[in-house]
Image (cartoon, rainbow, N blue to C red):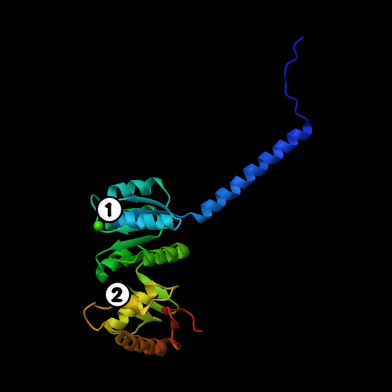
Amino acid sequence: SCDLMIPVYTMQYKICVKRKLTQILFTSVIMKKKYKELTMRLLVVEDEQSLREDITKKLQHSGYEVDACGDGETASEYLAVEYYDLVLLDLNLPKIDGMTLLRNFRKENQETPVLILSARSEINDKVEGLDSGANDYLSKPFHLAELEARIRSLTRRQFIQRDVCLQCGKITYDTKSRIATVDGVAINLTRKETGVLEYLMLHQGRPVSQEELIEHVWDSSVDSFSNSIRVHISALRKKLRAVLGYDPIRNRIGEGYEIEGESK
Ligand code: CA
């Protein structure tokens, strides 16, 4: 006779295997979920190769999943097929320029935050960028640490710049006309005060340091001294307090200034 070597599994063995499999499966689902929650997917569109590689390396090192490309056409192909949590976009790009790419992207996608990285630091470019649907603007050259701070703030807020009016409590700021209003009444601000208010309102939710204000609001050649900044901020606060009844600008010791919509 031939004894076939058929393995005999007892019911208990089967249950044990099933439990083990369920455990493995369950753990992997949880891990996958956690991994998904933790990993943000970013697209870097930058034609300057060394900068693109530096940004990519740094962000990958920080745990982001990063796709990168060097022209607008490739970028639009990426955007058509992949979901990104954030797009870092240079403006001067071969094939399709950044602004056109952004406008086209916003027609399809209103949610993904876009951070413009550009050497063009003129306010008109910033406004045009924001007008076209960018969420923030970082002028080159920048520190990678600053870039990361912006990314964190943007992915946290996920706010959408649907129009060019910024809002903070009762203050409305029109980035096109560069006029701030409270209850529809314009506040009479100088050019510097306007610049400070605009920058603070663009970066709500985090303190802005004096160094950052010097870099972004002040003309680099003239009166870039912290004393002068203090004078302008103090004047701005006085004017805001007069119309709001409270001072919306907070001093964050060691960090800088932050604008808030609510009185304390
Ligand atoms: Ca470029």
Q: Mark 1–mark 2 contact, CB under 8 Å?
A: no
Earlier residue among tags 1 and 2? 1
Residue 49, disc: 1
**Residue 152, placed above or below residue 81:** below
For the residues labelled 1 and 2, the Cα–Cα distance comes to 25 Å
Choose between 2 and 252: the one closer to the eye: 2
- The residue furthest left is 221
Of the 4 image quadrants, the one containing the N terminus is top right
Whether residue 133 can be seen here: no
Q: Quadrant of residue 153?
A: bottom left
| Residue designated by label 2 | 215
Crowding around mark 1 (Cα neighbors within 10 Å: few <14, some 14 to 19, many 20+) is: few
* Amino acid identity at mark 2: Glu
Disc nearest the viewer among 1 and 2: 1
Judged left or right of residue 214, residue 145 is right
- Point out residue 122 in the picture as x, y percentages from the top left corner: 24, 70
In the image, 164 versus 252, the foreground residue is: 252
Could you say where residue 196 lies in the image, as x and y percent from the top left?
A: 33, 79
